[in-house]
Each structure stands twice: as C-alpha cells, then as structure tokens.
Image (cartoon, rainbow, N blue to C red):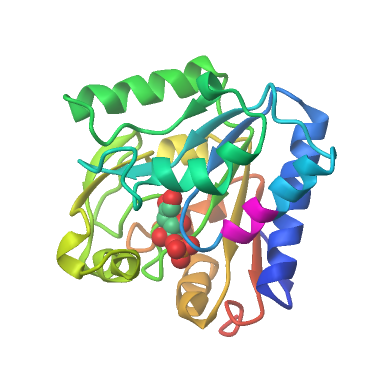
C-alpha cells in the first residue's frame, strides 16, 4: 500500500483527478469504480473542469458506483444516484447506458445484487476503484464485522455510519438503515485502488487500515493485501501515522 501525504484537501483532489485522468488517457474505455460522500467531491469538481477544458473524454468510459441506500428513490436528493448525477454525470459526456449504480428501489434487492456483480464481470472488471473511508474503517458500506461479504449485498448500516451520514439528512431518523454495497471481493478485484481521506476525523481509521494488521474489524485494512493500492491523504488524516 502506497501512502501519499499532501498538504490540503485541494491538493488531494488534484492528485486524485490526475490518477483518473491518466487511467482514462491510457484506456478510453476504462471501467471506473466510483464513490460518493464528501471526500471525492473536490475530485469530481476537478474532473468536470478538465472535461470542460477538453483535457479528458468520458465518451467510452464505464462506471460502477460502490453503493446506494435501500428504498431511497433515485431522484431523492440524498440518494447516491442524485449525488452522481448532480456532481459529475450531468456535467461530462459519459453515456447514460455506461453508468451503473445499484438500484436501491429494486423490487428484489437480492436479485439486484447478483445482477450488479454480473454486470461488473461482463464489463471486464474495474480498472480503477475510487474509495473514501468511514471513520469506523468501512469502505463502500462494508461495515466492521466478524465476517465480510465478497459479493454485492444488502447491509445494515452501523450506528456510527448512520450518525456520520445524518449530516446530509434533516434528522438521524431519516437516514435509511439499509443499503446495497459492492462487497470486498469486487473492490479487491479492481486492478488499481485509490483511497482518499481528509481531516482529523479520519486519522484513526487511516492509522488502523495501514498498520500491518488485517482485520474485518477495519474493512479498509484488507487493502494492505492489494497489489496496487494507493492512499492519498491530507496531513490531518495522516496525523496519527
Ligand atoms: C460512499 C461510500 C462510503 C464513503 C465513506 C466516507 O460511496 O461508499 O464508504 O466513502 O463513508 O464518506 P465521506 O467521504 O462523506 O467522509
């Protein structure tokens, strides 16, 4: 695991956008695994800027998002569908049929999970997986547990995650309690992984994901076993290293 410490959120976002840009320049049909949340927002702003300046072309790019809340319609302002549309997809030339996000409103969520895994395989797997990290060490919505799932699955969000994500909702009660998330297998199968983190709130998670121990209590620690995982963090998130 390669750890790059930068000075600020903005530097982290620029460097992350550099990685995405070079992956797409090397392969205009690249398959990207995308994350939502506060962390990658600056990277998306930068990618949109580069697209507008003609520096990057998303025409043939395929995307798979990590996760989506269960039972939140795609047009709900806190759904990850809405996030991706408003922060990235509406502003670039990615083709709608190449965009994949788990459907949280599927009639049969279990079938939706297996459909999603099949689509990732049919696309040839993920070339670059972007990740944030929860302050409890989750990646995607793979929460700390005795055992972690390999495939896309339904998950019950932990009280930590509900609390953290309540900042986007009017109240804690409104945060959906369940989500669909790509599993650890789909994440670890990505050819390249880029995890981003910023702020002191992530310092403890960053320390325990990189201290040479692999444990399902810190799902992100499994990334230490990946052959091409890079972590770009600001100095606040690196405070305990
Ligand atoms: C988002 C996701 C989550 C977030 C994590 C950090 O698609 O899968 O794992 O990356 O919860 O969220 P932020 O960036 O809001 O601190």
26 with respect to 214 (left or right): right
Which residue is more in the foreground, 94 or 62?
94
209 with respect to 134 (left or right): right
Which residue is more in the foreground, 179 or 215?
179
Which residue shows up at 57% across the image and 37% down it?
89
Please state, as top left, top right, bottom left or bottom right, where the C terminus lies in the image. bottom right
Residue 235: percent from left, percent from top: 66, 80
Residue stretch rendered in magenta on the structure: 40-45
Which residue shows up at 76% across the image and 31% down it?
57
Establish if 137 lies above or below 8.
above
Which residue shows up at 46% across the image and 72% down it?
205
Establish if 52 lies above or below 168.
above
**Residue at the extreme top:** 122
Counting every numbered tag in the picture gives 0
Residue 220: percent from left, percent from top: 46, 58
Rendered image quadrant of residue 52: top right
Q: Is residue 174 visible?
A: yes
31 part of magenta stretch:
no
Quadrant hosting ligand 1: bottom left
Rendered image quadrant of residue 13: bottom right
Residue 125: percent from left, percent from top: 55, 25
Which residue is more in the foreground, 18 or 89?
89
Which residue shows up at 70% across the image and 30% down it?
58
Q: Main secondary structure of the magenta part?
A: helix
42 part of magenta stretch:
yes
70 with respect to 133 (left or right): left
Establish if 154 lies above or below 222.
above
Residue 34: percent from left, percent from top: 53, 43
Please state, as top left, top right, bottom left or bottom right, where the N terminus lies in the image. bottom right
Q: Is residue 1 visible?
A: no
4 with respect to 154 (left or right): right
Which residue is more in the foreground, 148 or 105?
105
């Amino acid at each position: 695991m390669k750890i790059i410490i930068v000075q600020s959120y903005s530097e982290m976002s620029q460097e992350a956008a550099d990685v995405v840009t070079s992956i797409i320049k090397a392969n205009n049909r690249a398959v990207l695994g995308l994350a939502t949340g506060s962390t990658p927002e600056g990277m998306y702003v930068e990618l949109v800027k580069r697209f507008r300046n003609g520096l990057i072309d998303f025409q043939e790019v395929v995307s798979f998002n990590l996760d989506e809340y269960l039972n939140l319609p795609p047009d709900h302002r806190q759904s990850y569908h809405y996030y991706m549309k408003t922060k990235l997809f509406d502003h670039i030339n990615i083709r709608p049929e190449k965009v994949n996000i788990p459907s949280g409103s599927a009639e049969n969520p279990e079938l939706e999970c297996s459909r999603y895994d099949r689509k990732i395989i049919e696309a040839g797997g993920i070339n670059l997986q972007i990740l944030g990290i929860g302050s409890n060490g989750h990646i995607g919505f793979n929460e700390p547990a005795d055992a972690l799932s390999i495939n896309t699955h339904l998950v019950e969000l932990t009280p930590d995650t509900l609390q953290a994500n309540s900042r986007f909702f009017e109240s804690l009660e409104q945060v959906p309690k369940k989500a669909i998330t790509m599993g650890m297998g789909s994440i670890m199968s990505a050819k390249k992984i880029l995890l981003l983190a910023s702020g002191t709130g992530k310092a403890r998670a960053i320390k325990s994901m990189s201290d040479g121990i692999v444990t399902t209590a810190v799902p992100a620690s499994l990334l230490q076993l990946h052959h091409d995982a890079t972590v770009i963090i600001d100095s606040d998130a690196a405070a305990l290293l």
